[in-house]
Image: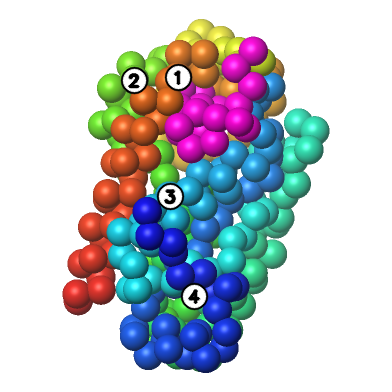
Amino acid sequence: MTAPDRLAEMTTLEAADAVARGTIVLIPAGALEQHGPGMVLGTDLVRAEAVVAQVAANLAGRVVVGPSIPLGVSPHHMAFPGTVTLTTSTFAAVVREYVTSLHTHGWTRFLVVTGHGGNNATLTTVAQDLLVSHPGVQLAWSPLTSLAGDAVAALDPSAVHGHSGEAETAQMLHIAPHLVHPDRLEPGTTTPDQLDDVSRTARHHAQPALTLPYDRLSGNGVLGDPRRATAEDGAAIVQAIVGRITTFLEEWLAA
């Protein structure tokens, strides 16, 4: 795999050259939050960085990988030790000032790849605000797992699944197996009847959306049964994610 062009490893002359070539800046974003008893707190960033590296290898010379944003919006996980959260306003300010700093030097297109769904709403807000404050900026963002719905469905996951469940664990077994503790993987909430009435309503309806703390949804912070995940499943999910982000960027670069 071709090594990606990383902004932090460039000189200012090389950065100027990357701007002149019309590169898109890729920004991995994650979180530091609980991922059950069997996976590390940095799971979301590990996955985002791995996907961005593979996408950048597919588009060598046409994109630049910016420094990662390791913390995200995670108040819903704060009942679990080790979790660190930013407020939405702080996370928005970091993204906005990161992007506008690079825009000052000539970059106009940015893609934030976030491994943490809690960042999504804020990223949308920042992109909307930039339309007014910096109309020359195009800011896109992408999730990970939801891009690979077909590959996730092939896992036949639990009726209730998601955070630290089959799909996330499979990705980590593929990307960073040394950061998974197989002997500690255990199921969390796997069926609707394990949820209280409000939680069941929140999980049953994608819209309207109701945000709840994860300790209400699951005693161990897990949705699904991570013991059922395999590295092969993870490879299929990651391949689908990388392929779809690469296709988007190819179209954007050609536009």
When the figure is inspected, residue 225 is found, relative to residue 216, above or below; the finding is: above
> Was residue 179 drawn as part of the magenta stretch in this picture?
yes
Q: Identify the element where label 4 is drawn.
A: helix
Q: How far apart are marks 2 and 1 (CA)?
A: 8 Å
Residue type at tag 4: Asp
> Where residue 19 sits: x, y (%)?
42, 86
Range drawn in magenta: 164-183
Q: In which quarter of the image is residue 178?
A: top right
Q: Identify the element where label 1 is drawn.
A: loop
Residue type at tag 3: Val
Q: Distance between the residues labelled 3 and 4?
A: 27 Å
Q: In this view, does 72 lie to the left or right of 250?
A: right
Q: Find disc 3 in the rendering and name its residue.
A: 51
Q: Find disc 4 in the rendering and name its residue.
A: 129
Name which of mark 2 and mark 1 comes first in the sequence. 2
Q: Is residue 31 left or right of residue 19?
A: right
Name which of mark 3 and mark 2 comes first in the sequence. 3
> Where residue 198 sits: x, y (%)?
56, 23
Say which residue appears at 80% left-offset and 33% top-offset: 81
Residues marked 1 and 4 touching at CB (< 8 Å): no
Nearer mark to the viewer, of 1 and 4:
1
